[in-house]
Image (cartoon, helix red, strand yellow):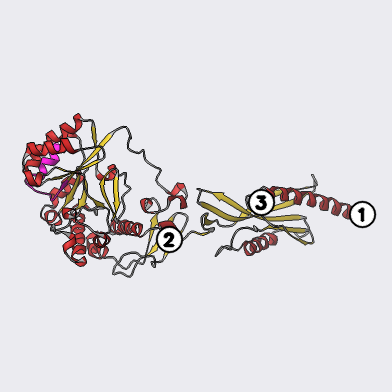
Amino acid sequence: MQFVENKQLEKRVAKQTTLLLNQVKHEQEKNELATEEKVTKKANLVEVSYPPSEIPSIDGFDFDQITQESMKKMEKKLNPKDPAVLVSHLAINHYTEQLAAYEVAVDLYLWQNKSEEFIKTKTKTTKPVLINHSTGQLITSQDLIKKEENLLGIQQVIQQMLLDQAADPNLILDEVLNLPRLSWDTPMTYTEEQLVVQLPQNKLGQTTIALPYAKIQPFIQTDLVKPEYLIPPTQALDANQKYVALTFDDGPSPVTTPKIIQILANKGIKATFFLLGQNVKENPELTKQIFEGGHELASHSYSHPSFNTISKEAVKKEVIDTDKAIFEATGCLPKILRPPYGAVNTDTAKVVGKPIIQWNVDSLDWKTKNSAAIQKVVKNSVASGGIILMHDIQPATAEALDQVINDLKAQNYQFVTIQELLEQKMYPMHQYFGQFDQRNI
């Protein structure tokens, strides 16, 4: 009698197994990837896997091996007397058009004596492997960063982070500013949440740094990062509004700069100051006052040489010495630079390693040194998206500024900093003459 009952149970289990496998197969046919069916029977256990047949070989991702290891672990926990089915398949989660996560999912179906059917009781998934849709492979640092100019931008982020993390940043400032440049040979590891960079050999005693993607967002392909690890897009400048950026070169001057920042404060306007390192060194408190007033600080070299007439080493020293002076005064490194006389070429731009900011409205304050003339030039030359060049060391500029602002307001201009005007989309090896005029160097 027991023998007959067992035989009948075997038939019911076999029938339900066939129904389950047909159901699973039907579900797999809906999968975006073509698969093959592999069935292995072991006493009361049936193992079924659906390896994808059309994806290329991916380094570090072997579906069959992962399936075998996962099923083996699950099988050890099963009662060999209980009928069971293990089904392995590739689960794909799309995060962006270019980013997908591949993971092997193993479903456990156990026989239920009361209902005489298989019920899925557990699903075990492996650690996701992030794949670049364009290549069908694991994401590399070069996929993520793409261009050399972005390496230079990430270099700036690393320098500021190292200083922010230091107990006493001034002790390591020189080492940070002289940190060897990143290159495509620099070991970098792409992870789900951050990019881990092995620092070039240095005297800091730090070998790696983890860069959250939000920190390097302007310099990476954001469609290769899960959106939750990025800063949501901010509202763009209103296309129906007119914007202009006031910029001041050559300061700070203890005579004229305080007058200029007072006028700006009275008008509720933020500007961008391109500072000379030697003047910052002499006026650190004034520099800090500009910074704390909410203005953007930028580099204009240390001693105002034409970069195209001095050596690369001299250019590097001009940049580093200015960065150092501004950091010592404010705790922040300048992100952008305006070369003296606007003189820049490919070689010097690479040494500088920062976005280059030019101008499209020259107030000629340095030439006329006349308040009325400055007002007239700006009023007649400005256009939406303009970058206005002035000098906060010129007394005539301080005298003209209030009326310059009034004239621009009368023309319905909104005032923004350079970073706001360009919506933080600024890259080394590029120069910017206005909101709508950027050029490769």
SS at circle 1 = helix
Q: Earlier in the sequence, mark 1 or mark 2?
A: 1
Instruction: Give the residue number, with chain letter if any, for mark 3.
Output: 122
Q: Nearer the viewer, residue 166 or 126?
A: 126
Three-letter residue code for mark 2? Gln
Circle 1: residue type: Val
Which dot marks residue 4?
Answer: 1
The residue at which mark 2 appears reads as 142
Magenta region includes residue 345 = no
Is 37 positioned to the left or the right of 345 in the image? right
Spatial CA distance of label 1 from label 2 is 66 Å
Disc 3 to disc 2, C-alpha distance: 38 Å
Q: Quadrant of the C terminus?
A: bottom left
Q: Secondary structure at mark 3?
A: strand
Circle 2 residues within 10 Å: few <14, some 14–19, many ≥20 = some
What residue sits 14% from the left and 52% below the top? 284
Q: Which residue ends up furthest to the top in the rendered image?
A: 410
Q: Which residues are magenta?
A: 248-264
Q: Is the C-beta separation of discs 1 and 2 under 8 Å?
A: no
Residue at 39%, 42% in the rendered image: 233
